[in-house]
Amino acid sequence: MPIDITRLSQAQPFQPADHHGVGPVHLFGGSDYDGAVTTALSHYLPGGRADMSPVAAETLYVVLTGTLSLDAEGDTYDLHPLDAVRLTAGTPRGVENRTNLPASMLVIRPNPAAGQAGDTAEERS
């Protein structure tokens, strides 16, 4: 199929390890997904965070709403709507919503399970 559409109402929620107060959904991804790139929409409640850990693969973040703080390479960066970040594989990072309002971002990365059955790295990182 040359076009694959996921309606937000059909997106599947999942819970990645070491994420607290974060409600992500797969727009493209999950255990049966064989596309080359995964995309998740992550909603961070106030105080929500992804603990410091290395990203499994090159990862792109695009903040859609709110403000998120990214800790990486010994620095902290406040990310605002439409700010984008590229992290290379293995880069340790932590993300936290340090505000009193929810924040959302897209998380885009390659799917190492493309063409194979089983878990994707996105579900483990």
Image: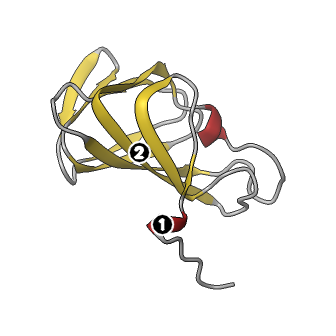
Quick check: 62 above or below 96?
Answer: below
Q: Which of 117 and 58 is in front in this view?
A: 117
Dot 1 falls on a residue whose secondary structure is: helix
Other residues around mark 1 within 10 Å, as few (<14) / some (14–19) / many (≥20): few
Q: Is tag 1's residue or tag 2's residue first in the polypeptide sequence?
A: 1
Residue 51 horizontal/vertical position (percent): 44, 19
Q: In this view, does 102 lie to the left or right of 73?
A: left
- The amino acid type of the residue labelled 2 equals Ser
Dot 2 falls on a residue whose secondary structure is: strand
Q: Which of 98 and 94 is in front in this view?
A: 98
Q: In this view, does 111 lie to the left or right of 82?
A: right
Image quadrant where residue 124 sits: top right
The residue identified by callout 2 is: 42
* Numbered label attached to residue 9: 1
Residue 32 horizontal/vertical position (percent): 76, 57
Residue 45 horizontal/vertical position (percent): 30, 34
